[in-house]
Image: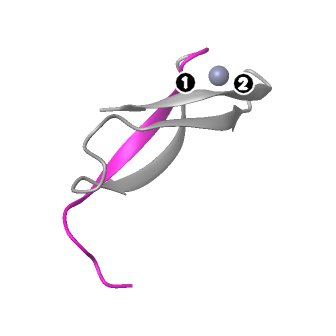
Amino acid sequence: MAAKGPRESITLECTDCKRRNYLTSKNKRNNTERLEVVKYCKYCKKRTTHKETK
Ligand SMILES: [Zn+2]
């Protein structure tokens, strides 16, 4: 896979329990705003909103 543009590693944090559950990366050129994804949190045992953290 060829690297395109500046990719940044980010951590996704559950907004309910504040635990960092997911590691991912994003292209800063396409995504300038903070990432927000609904994912399953194993600590909350439900789907919650996960936000990008630094
Ligand atoms: Zn959680």
Look at the picture and state if 50 lies above or below 1: above
Task: Classify mark 1 as within 8 Å of ligand 1 or not, answering yes or no.
Answer: yes
- Mark 2 closeness class: few <14, some 14–19, many ≥20 residues within 10 Å: few
Mark identifier at residue 19: 1
Question: What percent of the width, then of the height, locates residue 20?
Answer: 51, 31
What type is the residue that disc 1 sits on? Arg
Residue that appears at 34% across and 34% down? 34
Left or right: where 40 falls relative to 15: right
Looking at the image, which residue sits at the far top? 16
Quadrant in the picture for residue 27: bottom left
- In percent of width and height, residue 2 lies at 31, 84
Q: Is residue 10 magenta?
A: yes
Q: Height in image: 4 above or below 22?
A: below
Q: Residues within 10 Å of mark 1 (few under 14, many from 20)?
A: some
Three-letter amino acid code at disc 2? Tyr
Q: Quadrant of the C terminus?
A: top left
Magenta span covers which residues?
1-17
Q: Quadrant of residue 37?
A: top right
Q: Residue at x 54, y 18 (%)?
A: 15
Quarter of the N terminus within the rendering: bottom left
- Up/down of 21 relative to 45, above or below: below
Pointer 2 with pointer 1, Cβ within 8 A: yes
Residue at 74% across, 21% down: 44
Secondary structure under tag 1 reads loop
Which of marks 1 and 2 precedes in the sequence? 1
Ligand 1 in which quarter: top right
Q: Name which residue lies at 33% across and 51% down.
A: 9
Tell me which colouring the rendered structure shows. one colour
Disc number for residue 48: none
Whether the residue under disc 2 has CB within 8 Å of ligand 1: yes
For marks 2 and 1, give the CA distance: 8 Å
Q: Which of the numbered marks, if any, corresponds to residue 43? A: 2
